[in-house]
Image: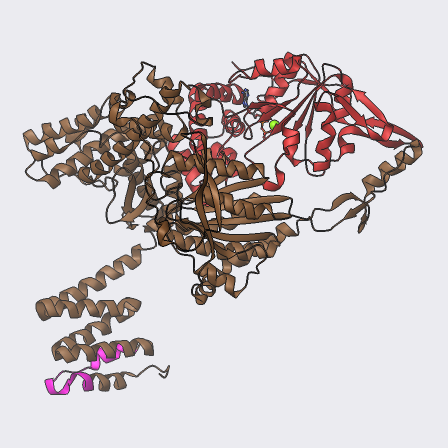
Amino acid sequence: MSERKLFAHELEARLDELLLLSLRQRSAEEPAALLEALPRQMQERVLHWAGVAAQTSDDLGWLIASLAAVQAASLGESLDDWVRAGLDAYDRSGLAATRKVLNEFAAARQGSARRSLDSVSFVAIEGRLSRFLHALDGRPLRLVSGKTAWTDTETLWLPERLDVATDAAGNRRLFKAMAALLWAQTRFGTFNVDPEVELALWPDRGRGLAWFALFEAMRLEACIAIELPGLALDIAALRGPWPAELEAAAESLARSDATVADSLNCMAALRKVGAGDTPKFPHVGVLDPVAARRVRAARVVREMAIVRRALNVLRGTGLHGPDADKSDYPPLAAEGETQVVDPQSELLSLPPPAREAAKSLMQDFGDIPPEVLHPAGPGAWQPVEGIDTSNAASCTVQPDAFYDEWDYRRATWRHDWCHLYEMEAPSGDHEWVDEVKLRHAHLIRSIRRRFEALRGEDKPQKRQFDGEEIDLDAQVDARADRKSGAEPSSRLFIHRRRVERSLAVMFMVDMSGSTKGWVNDAERESLVLLCEAIEALGDSYAIYGFSGWTRTHCDIYRIKRFGDRYDAETRQRIAGIEAKDYTRMGVAVRHLSGLLVRQNTRHKLLVTLSDGRPDDYGDEYRGRYGIEDTRRALLEAREKGIRSYCVTIDRHGADYLPQLYGPAHYSVIDDARKLPQKIAEIYRKLTG
Amino acid sequence: MNTTKPAGRTDVRALTGSLVRLVSEPYYHATGDELAVFEAAARSCLPVMLKGPTGCGKTRFVEHMAWRLKRPLVTVACHDDLTTADLVGRYLIVGDETVWMDGPLAAAVRAGAICYLDEIVEARKDTTVVIHPLTDSRRALPVEKRGEYIDAPPDFMLVISYNPGYQSVLKEMKPSTRQRFVALDFDYPEADIEASIVAHEGGVDAATAKKLVKLGSLTRKLKGAGLDEGAGTRLLVHAAQLIAAGMDAGTACTAAIARPLADETDTRAALDDLIAAVF
Ligand SMILES: Nc1ncnc2c1ncn2[C@@H]1O[C@H](COP(=O)(O)OP(=O)(O)OP(=O)(O)O)[C@@H](O)[C@H]1O
Ligand SMILES: [Mg+2]
């Protein structure tokens, strides 16, 4: 298409032809004159759409052409959407409606173009907000975007974009206030009482919920003010004063002993005098008590079981005190046995996962429910044995190796318990890696640069036998030694040889079913970035995937052996990593640390990329058993001189990690999408 | 509560070389049984290892113990260029004479002092081994250049510090070194204790100190999720000192806490949000 703009007379002729204007005694002179100013491409778009519309009706074609002439310049890119909205309106409600829709669309577009500079998107503020929330007390919360602001007590939904305040800073503050209020709902017990009794009395449930949300906002703001007064002030400034008729309620809900029941009482009082529409405040989201209480109920069951189980173990063994979680537990408490112990001190001596669960229960009830503290009967944990739905029969190949597994309940090994199969990982799409490299080209370049610096970070090595420079300090020492009659050292030079890193790294990649989707993509992308980075460093490294299905099917997938080059085939195997079955981790650690220990390097590092705790089909490996076995395996590795590190994407707080890896040897990535960006940095810190 | 000496500093009198004697009590707030354990170790001539995150009072504790036990103190900050000679000593040429100059470790051994090797993992591997004979039943320091063995008097005590938060595998402490020490775990003090430390050291009122401690505890939850390490007591004290000097709390916390902790934009912004939330 030629770049030359069409002149008005040319445009007039084309429109005439398209819309048969002369027949209808209309003139395209005016629109043509307006269209003359547009770039050629835009002119063609308008002509195209006028033609399309004319096929439905000449009048519609004319409407589109004449309005487009006026508005095309300001519509720009969104011209196509504008026309489509018009065509759609025509089909549904005819010509008059079309004109209205087209005008409104254009007006809205102009408005948002003006405002969009000040609007703030969820994506832009997500990282900052999620860290902010992470630091606040209480159980970990996931942050995602949605239509409205609300929470189910484990996930916070925030709008995709805010454009309410007059500037970007204001919109960011609003995001923060919304998130803080939702956090406060989970922290200060909004869902600890069932509001249905009250809500049922409201003829309009929606209105009732809106008032509930508002009264809670009043109460929670005061809760926030106690520990985070700055945040509360921010919120207060943002919302402005409460309406005069609600001031009394706001004041009573701000009392330090107010609870969600008081908010419900305020609702009841208001209902009796007749409630009008709720005044709107931008930071107050919506409440969905049904969804929230469902999530809460599931959590409570889960956590009560955890705490009971741990208490049972504790009581059965008489192991109190901080060492309790370090030892391997002897057999469980006899059923039905209850002892009177100080619950508080007892809770403190629980192992970390159970302590977290107990804290979370306190958050849900304000206190630990008594039935948890006096567990008996069905609460006692019965380990399921022999659930092993061993389908070994279906498997004709001999396992490549057998491994012992640690059973902490018996405090002993189960010999040759796990059947391990090692196999080549299937190849994936070879274009995928290229695509990742292209997409992350910038990141890869900067990682490489930083890694090369690390490698070249050969601080001059002083006091060497040989070298490029004279070591003055050493010379002075030697001279002094000679004078005093002592034998001078002959290490008199500075050498700039590259520091030998002597490091072998094994990457152990979780290929369990739960990694399907984002996590799997993130793992694969991270491996590409890691390979690019480590190639720059020259460390020796291998990559293996692991998954499986019960103890008789523990699979290890070779992606890159230590000797293998990072070549097209390796890259294809990385691309081919996919989500498979379960996470029986101990055996994978044992097998891979066996491979790693054969490396002839001074330092050996086992890095696990995973999305959660050890787990396998059936109850056996779930929970404590899997964690204990994995911990054993990691300890064994450690005894062989292998350091372990875990990078995990575990949205359930990963409370078991300190137990497995020790406090300093893991990172939790809150969002799989960030893994590729983070991973190289983690590796650099780990080996720098 | 405030003393007249400059906040956060201890009174020392320099003895010869790197030896100092603490002349007034360095303020130290005990958080557990560390005083008793240290004293017992000192009585039994056992070396001590202090583990814990940065800025949680390890150095201050050693100063306090030196004062308590009335022993001189030598502190060496270890770095990766630290050689054996830097610790043990070397010949210097003065005029046309050669003079032997004890290094800090040798000086400490001779004087029956407490020698504190700070961040021992930073030192070169071949340097760390010189402390081995000092830390077992031999209790002696070999000075190779002079063909001398300095026997350590009972008052000599070796203390090392070590931050397990270090994540580089290349800097792990060898078991043969670790297992020579009585270990004391340091952690951030409990909120009330930490608040009184911050108030005392930073010269701020109790309410401000409490807020600073709250902020500190919030940042510590970000460990592993944006931060390598949360704010130690030291950073809180720094912020308090800036506030005591008249700076407004938000600016002081940004400068003394948020900026030193994080480089990444999101994390910095989140820290700013936390500061704004607490004050
Ligand atoms: N228990 C405590 N009693 C008194 N002051 C303390 C205590 N803990 C921390 N501080 C204060 O924190 C500051 C930092 O402590 P210190 O220098 O001892 O840290 P550190 O553990 O040696 O850190 P690093 O590992 O970085 O050397 C001290 O100057 C002091 O003001
Ligand atoms: Mg120190």
- Residue at 44% x, 61% y is A426
Chain B appears what colour?
red
Q: Residue at x 28, y 34 (%)?
A: A302
Q: Main secondary structure of the magenta part?
A: helix
Residue A35, quarter of the rendered image: bottom left
Q: Is residue A25 magenta?
A: yes
- The colour chain A appears in is brown
Left or right side of A64 for A494 = right
**Spot occupied by residue A177 in the image (x, y as percentages of width and height):** 31, 39
Q: As drawn, is A334 to the left or to the right of A547?
A: left
Start-end of magenta stretch:
A16-36
Q: Position of residue A274 (x, y in %)?
A: 6, 33
Residue A90: % across, % down: 12, 70
Direction from residue A272 to residue B215 in the image, left or right:
right
User: Is A452 situated above or below A285?
Assistant: below
List x then y, in percent, for residue A645: 51, 42
Whether residue B143 is in magenta: the answer is no
For this rendering, which residue is in front, A639 or A389?
A389
Which image quarter holds the N terminus of chain A? bottom left
Query: Which residue is painted at 74% across and 24% down in the image?
Result: B18
